[in-house]
Image (cartoon, rainbow, N blue to C red):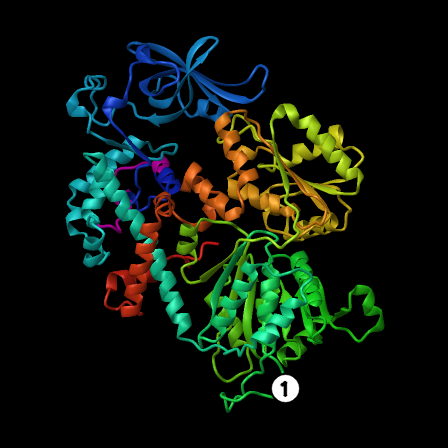
Amino acid sequence: MLLSSEIKTVMRIDANQEKALKRLKILTVRDLLFYFPVRYSNISEVKLIRDLLAGENATIFGAISDAKTKKGFRSKIPMGEATIEDLSGKIKVIWFNQAYMAKMVLNGESVRLSGKVTEGKQGLYLANPEVEHTPTMPIDSHETLFAGSKEDEDIRYPVYKETRGITSKWIFHAMQKVFKSGLLETLEDYLPEDILKKYNLPKLSTALVWIHYPKKEKDSLAARKRFAFEEVFFIQLQKQKTRAEAAALESYTVDVDQKDIADFMSRFPFTPTNGQERAVQHILADFLKGRPMSRLIEGDVGSGKTAVAAAAAYAIIKNRPPKKDEKDKKQTFGNLQIAYMAPTEILATQHFESFIKYFKHTGINIGLITGSGCRKFPSKVASSSLHGGWTDISRSQLLKWVANGEIPILIGTHTLIQKSVAFKHLAMVVIDEQHRFGTLQRGKLAKKESTSWQILPHLLSMTATPIPRTLALTIYGDLDLTLLDEMPEGRKQIITEIVTPDKRKIVYEKVRQEMEQGRQLYVICARINDADPDKELALNLKSVTSEARRLKKEIFPEYNIGILHSKMSKQKKEEVMKDFYQKKIDVLVATSVVEVGVNVPNATMIIIEGAERFGLSQLHQLRGRVIRSTHQAYCYVFAETKTQKTLDRLKALKTAKNGFELSELDLALRGAGELAGTKQWGLSDLGMEAIKNIKMVEAARAEATRLIQEDKSLHSYPMLFQILSTQKQDLHFE
């Protein structure tokens, strides 16, 4: 048996099991070994049904009967219902908002259930329990099941994530077969021995035994620590390797006149915050280092990231390109160039308009390129004043001017990285909310230059997604981080209200009063369409389609209502946002797809349905959609639950100073796995667990940096080199 051996060649499985293993992404022995338990259980945890007490969390083992789906008599919420029986008695089981669970258990099947014992009108029942399909306990012994002997207290059994056709018990026995084969004894550890010793981490073979078959809790914790560390370590290793490779390339050195920059920023229509001033100084210092800048500006919506980018761009365009034959001298004509990329056409257009305001006194040419067309500022056409001083121009003319260096600032969408777009002296790339645009893409842009030497542009990346510091240090390991944690002076605070179901009518009346003043409204729902209660993962959540119909019919019949969600085409989404921006739509019902999008100053209200389903960070970012107006903005957080725990969590939206504080709170309250948007980071559950530990993240980062500094190619560490070389994707996550 080898790590690369396919499961179907070393174990007897049928066609259905093979399909099930594919769903779990278990194709090889290696995949199986690294399929870690989601939790552990022991015999002493199991209780008899007759001994259950109201209010406790309990684990029981028994046979299922009367499994069915239904709807609540009054609430109409989808429910799954069943009865479980052991030798001592029986108890009802209810899965609220999870009707599909009743179809995941079969009448007569023996299962293990873990959930809260609740007192109802008809007596005790088990509420929303977790299900483990295990016809017998792993040790195949009913006699010891309820024995509760001291010998059993430390015996821990792994519980794995299941799928139809593959149970936790199957994985348990399959893993035993691998262990008995002696394969573990042949494994060579890929983590350097000095790192293992320094941080007291178990070696690979030991860690695999401890994570699958821990005799004591400390064993499983030690194993999880090792695998959590290594995941963050490998991410950091790749990030630091990328960083070192970029640093070895040449970039334009930008001479900075501090007085000139200060004069430029003094023309802003607001007083720059301390955070903005600090961010600009960080960027200017990077320009003088002689290597390509890689910096991320992270700040809430409205914190002034675009203004910082404008100041950086001004520093760039004040510099002349070097001569091709005498790089130490400057040309007396032309400017260095900036490419500014935004995720949508509407947002690119808004940045174009913002840059016109910032640069109109300079006489600098600014271009806009999108799929819909091209624009140039300033224009010599008299009628252009109607458009703010810009004019529409042909794509070919714009590309010609960019190629010969006549347009120093070009703003656009992903159109910027097409082969037809060539720059003469591209000195900086600014990316708004699109951090996938990394070294490779910068290299593509750089190669389009008409210079005879390879020059990598500086990178200024920006995001409004508030994430914990530990996560930022991990996923942005190749970027220097600057936080904008202040709002411009005079910005009105959003009034946030937590709304329980009984207060809905009051809120709708408040919203109507604002809409009568000409304001617009966002309504956010967690789903696109209504869920089938009989289908897997069905939840009783409001959907975009049904809520839009309801609002039009019952609440705001006189207003135009539009919808927006991820399944719409890019073109259609752009059209909807354009209509909303131009006030052709009064109420926009959408999913969280609006989290990052166009700024609509007239949209001063947002209603978030099913708010308890979102993380605090995500709620904060959604709320940021209505922060752009000079008018008072309102955020109504509609919670379907009245539980104090949930309401207390949501109240943090009213007290937290900024998104970063909320992201840290989210991490503490809900756990890394519940952090809004974490799926996009590509981290495993263990990796997300690791980011809760700042010391672990910093240690992994320090060790990765040390290894790369010692040996950038990693030839001294062939196993590490091999692992990085075989990575299926660039670990840039965003």
Q: Which residues are magenta?
A: 1-17
Position of residue 304 measured from the top left corner of the image (x, y, whole percent): 60, 58
169 or 613: nearer the viewer? 613
- Which residue is rendered at x = 26% and y = 44% of the image? 9
Position of residue 574 measured from the top left corner of the image (x, y, whole percent): 68, 52
Quick check: 604 above or below 74? below
Quick check: 78 above or below 685? above
- Which residue is rendered at x = 32% and y = 19% of the image? 60
83 or 170: nearer the viewer? 83
Position of residue 474 measured from the top left corner of the image (x, y, whole percent): 39, 54
Quick check: 425 above or below 217? below
Q: Quick one: which residue is furthest to the bottom in this view?
A: 325
**Would residue 252 appear left or right of 11 to someone viewing this image?**
right
Q: Rate crowding at label 1 as few (under 14), some (14 to 19) or many (20 or more) other CA atoms within 10 Å.
A: few
Q: Secondary structure at mark 1?
A: loop
The residue indicated by pointer 1 is 333
Total marks placed: 1
**Would residue 247 appear left or right of 381 to someone viewing this image?**
left
Magenta segment: does it hold 635? no
The amino acid at mark 1 is Phe
Quadrant position of residue 264: bottom right
**Would residue 195 appear left or right of 125 to someone viewing this image?**
left
- Which residue is rendered at x = 40% and y = 51% of the image? 470
Position of residue 83 measured from the top left corner of the image (x, y, whole percent): 40, 14
Q: Quick one: which residue is furthest to the right in this view?
A: 383
Magenta segment: does it hold 13? yes
- Does the image show residue 271? yes
Quadrant position of residue 314: bottom right
- Does the image show residue 188? no
721 or 569: nearer the viewer? 721
